[in-house]
Image (cartoon, rainbow, N blue to C red):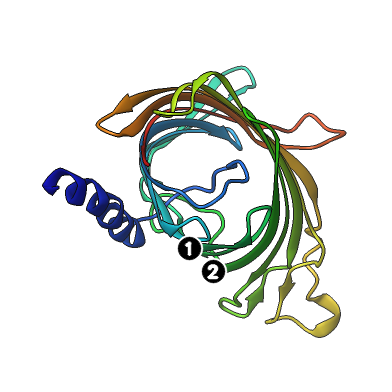
Amino acid sequence: MNRYIFLRIIPICVLAVAFLGHARETVSPVRAPESSVLFGGIAELRDDVYSADLNMAGEYAPCNCFSVYGDFSYRLVSYKWDVTLHDQRHEVLDLHVNGLNESYLGVKMVPYSFFGVDVSWRFPPREGSRVNRFHRLGVSPFGLYEFSRNMTLGAAAEYFTFLEKQNFQQGDEIGAKGSISWKLLWDRDDYSGWKFDYVFLYRWRIQESENLNMDKSYRKMDDLYRGFRMRVDAARYFALYGNSLGVSLFYEMNRGNLFGMETGHTLGLYAKLMFL
């Protein structure tokens, strides 16, 4: 009985820690509420900056219709190396954007088994990032369809709005996400076997950002964009004291354009404990 109580308290404690932390945004599959904790490492390349993070996340679902979650990471190192060849070699090393990154808190509400709403809040980063420095509120209605016993399809629409900061108003964004979760050689009794997740996300800014310090005719920032992201996870889950422990490797294209070559890349390894 004591072991059961201890295992049920863990996700609550981890979630409380997550409320105080900061994280980079992940491209996660559309999922129903679940109780879990996650710990992993991330290596990322974006805008010619190489970085490494430790990532921790938690979600607590008292029932199948509701959950609260948090996600945070700590950027251990951020490395930018610029080289220019004009009769000589110039090297620039940038190592000073290390520390707490963005943070995410949210709730999932699923009134029906096939439909729910995810409401999230993103807090600005501290020393761990120079981008995404605005508070952001997101609302994402989503749907789930169990295509077979071992395959679940998910789809979601997204809307994000940002709080004004220093008289600068970032433009609203919308998006669409689709995901496939496939289980192979899966034991449904003890939640063990192989699990593969694929996610595709397309997002675009529907309003230009505005600098409210300028005259009205000069406020537009000309920063409209459309781009996609995608992620693939391969995980092996094992039964553990009535719960399930998974070890996963993933690849994420964290920045891309449908008709361009600009991309960013993320590799990660994590362990996830599911509370059944």
- Give me the residue at 78% from left, 84% from top: 215
**Is 58 situated left or right of 185 in this image?**
left
**Left or right: where 78 falls relative to 221:** left
Camera-side residue: 136 or 132? 136
The residue at 81%/67% (across/down) is 207
> SS for tag 1?
loop
- Rendered image quadrant of residue 244: top left
Q: What amino acid type is highlighted by mark number 2?
A: His
Neighbor class of circle 2 (other Cα within 10 Å; few <14, some 14-19, many 20+) is: some
Q: Circle 2 sits on which residue?
A: 135
Q: Amino acid at mark 1?
A: Pro
Find residue 103 and report its horizontal and vertical position in percent: 44, 57
Image disc number at residue 124: 1
Percent of width and height locating residue 243: 32, 35
Where's residue 41, x and y in %?
38, 31
The reply to whether callout 1 and callout 2 are in contact (CB within 8 Å) is yes
Residue 180, percent across and down? 68, 33
